[in-house]
């Protein structure tokens, strides 16, 4: 297979795989009210249907990225797709809330194998001068999944039931496996022969579990203690990694590398400030505005469509203009959009919601592709898997923190109960407070994005 064919195959496979998890996440957001009613789940439990997937994915992303650098990125990628399909099949047959959350954990572990290696494979086969374009197309695939998720998820939920959202993942996964075996030749393992850091991986995963579960238990004292313990375990993790001969996270890639450090921090802040918006607006449109799942999906589709359209363009621009400039402009747009959402009420027009989602989508597109390009262009080849996984971890931890903030606000203002019509005003108040907090977060994100320095 010639070089051009290899690049084309890698891009098709990585982009197809990048489509699935966001499509799943956006579809599930639309189906949550239906699932919650069937399994009699309260607002916090509903949040865990999404968060359990994100948490398990974040726990395994960094270890899988390191394993991919050592044992082969294609091997780990294939394992991830296979496990993702198994998790989807099991979730489709869940008969209660606990089973669904456990099977979502399995699906999350599989997605860690996808996100920890897909971007690394692309970076391995594309030279620096073409990388922004390829990564932009890959990011556009993510946003296409986010675009189709609300619309198709709403249709599937309304006409075939929420279980069909999980079943639809299986044929996609089988197609990707077919393409891997017949089109993706070769292997990439620049850290071959090095050891995997199992103790470090366990400590890292434990820190994430404690922090995320602690966020969900706030404002109770148990939540505070869990967060303190999570922070302490995180400190132990970094202490261990500095002394490890073959760390799961080589701390040296942060030292004297402002581009890598601040680009990852910017990604963490951006996803912390934006991910729960889809979750909150899905509930707002169905509860406060009384829309069906299908019609709520049609409104939510505006943001990811804009993201998908402009991400490849932003990626190409970042091959010519410093990613710092483009990404910081995108973060600023997201910040403005979040503050605009803080003004919504039960009477707010759907046109206003759609306009803000379009503006947010443009900001997200300007931020994501250039930021990914900056991260992957700032490290050596043997760290591509770790770098891609670190960026993925920032994204997933940011998503978890975003959901954690939303669940914490629900716990304070609504409590552990189902969201019934008499609680709709309190839900709306909670959502507006969340949007203000997310907007303030984005202000800090702008400064982090500007502080990264130049890639070229």
Image (cartoon, rainbow, N blue to C red):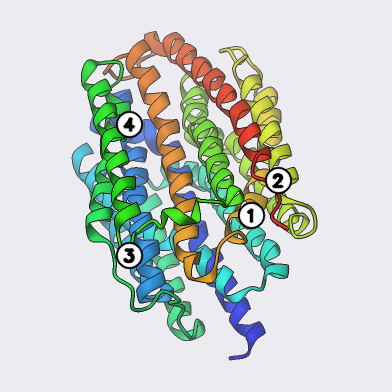
Of the 4 image quadrants, the one containing the C terminus is bottom right
Secondary structure beneath dot 2 equals helix
Q: Could you give the CA–CA distance between mark 4 and mark 1, rounded to whole angstroms?
A: 35 Å
Of the 4 image quadrants, the one containing the N terminus is bottom right
Pointer 2 with pointer 1, Cβ within 8 A: yes
Q: Which mark is residue 246?
A: 3
Residue 177 quadrant: bottom left
Left/right of residue 70 with respect to residue 3 in the rendered view: left
Pointer 4 with pointer 1, Cβ within 8 A: no
Q: Could you give the CA–CA distance between mark 3 and mark 2, rounded to whole angstroms?
A: 31 Å
Evaluate whether residue 96 shows in this view.
Answer: no
Residue indicated by mark 4: 46
Tell which circle, 3 or 1, labels the residue nearer the N-terminal end.
Answer: 3
Secondary structure beneath dot 1 equals helix
Left/right of residue 127 with respect to residue 384 in the rendered view: right
Q: Which mark is residue 324?
A: 2
Measured as percent of width and height from the top left, residue 267 is found at: 55, 43
Left/right of residue 204 with respect to residue 251 in the rendered view: left
Tell which circle, 4 or 3, labels the residue nearer the N-terminal end.
Answer: 4
Evaluate whether residue 172 shows in this view.
Answer: yes
| Residue 43 vs residue 393, the one in the foreground | 393
Q: Could you give the CA–CA distance between mark 4 and mark 2, rounded to whole angstroms?
A: 37 Å
Mark 2 nearby-residue class (10 Å; few <14, some 14–19, many ≥20):
many
Point 49% across, 34% down: residue? 272
């Amino acid at each position: 297979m010639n070089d051009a064919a290899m690049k084309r195959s890698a891009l098709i496979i990585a982009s197809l795989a990048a489509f699935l998890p966001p499509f799943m996440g956006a579809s599930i957001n639309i189906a949550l009210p239906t699932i919650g009613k069937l399994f009699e789940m309260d607002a916090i439990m509903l949040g865990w249907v999404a968060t359990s997937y994100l948490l398990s994915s974040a726990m395994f992303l960094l270890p899988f990225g390191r394993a991919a650098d050592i044992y082969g990125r294609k091997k780990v990628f294939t394992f991830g797709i296979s496990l993702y399909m198994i998790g989807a099949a099991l979730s489709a047959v869940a008969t209660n809330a606990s089973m669904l959350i456990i099977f979502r954990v399995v699906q999350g572990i599989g997605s860690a194998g996808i996100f920890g290696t897909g971007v690394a494979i692309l970076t391995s086969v594309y030279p620096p001068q073409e990388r922004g374009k390829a990564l932009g197309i890959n990011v556009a695939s993510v946003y296409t999944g986010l675009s189709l998720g609300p619309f198709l998820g709403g249709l599937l939920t309304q006409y075939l039931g929420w279980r069909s959202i999980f079943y639809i993942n299986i044929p996609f996964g089988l197609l990707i496996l077919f393409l891997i075996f017949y089109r993706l030749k070769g292997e990439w393992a620049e850290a071959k022969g090095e050891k995997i850091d199992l103790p470090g991986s366990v400590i890292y995963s434990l820190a994430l579990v404690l922090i995320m579960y602690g966020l969900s238990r706030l404002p109770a004292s148990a939540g505070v203690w869990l967060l303190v313990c999570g922070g302490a375990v995180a400190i132990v993790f970094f202490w261990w990694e500095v002394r490890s001969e073959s760390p799961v996270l080589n701390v040296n890639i942060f030292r004297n590398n402002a581009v890598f450090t601040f680009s990852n921090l910017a990604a963490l802040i951006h996803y912390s400030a934006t991910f729960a918006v889809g979750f909150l607006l899905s509930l707002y449109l169905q509860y406060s505005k009384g829309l069906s799942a299908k019609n709520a999906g049609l409104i939510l589709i505006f943001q990811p469509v804009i993201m998908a359209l402009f991400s490849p363009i932003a990626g190409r621009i970042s091959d010519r203009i410093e990613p710092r400039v483009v990404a910081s402009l995108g973060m600023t747009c997201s910040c403005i959009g979040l503050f605009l959402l803080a003004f919504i009420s039960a009477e707010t027009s759907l046109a206003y919601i759609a306009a803000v989602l379009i503006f947010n989508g443009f900001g997200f597109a300007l931020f994501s592709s250039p930021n990914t390009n900056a991260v992957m262009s700032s490290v050596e080849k043997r760290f591509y898997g770790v770098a891609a996984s670190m960026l993925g971890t920032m994204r997933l931890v940011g998503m978890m923190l975003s959901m954690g903030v939303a669940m914490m606000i629900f716990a304070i203002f609504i409590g552990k109960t189902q969201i019934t019509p008499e609680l709709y005003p309190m839900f709306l108040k909670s959502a507006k407070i969340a949007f203000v907090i997310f907007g303030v977060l984005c202000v800090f994100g702008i400064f982090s994005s500007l502080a990264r320095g130049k890639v070229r």
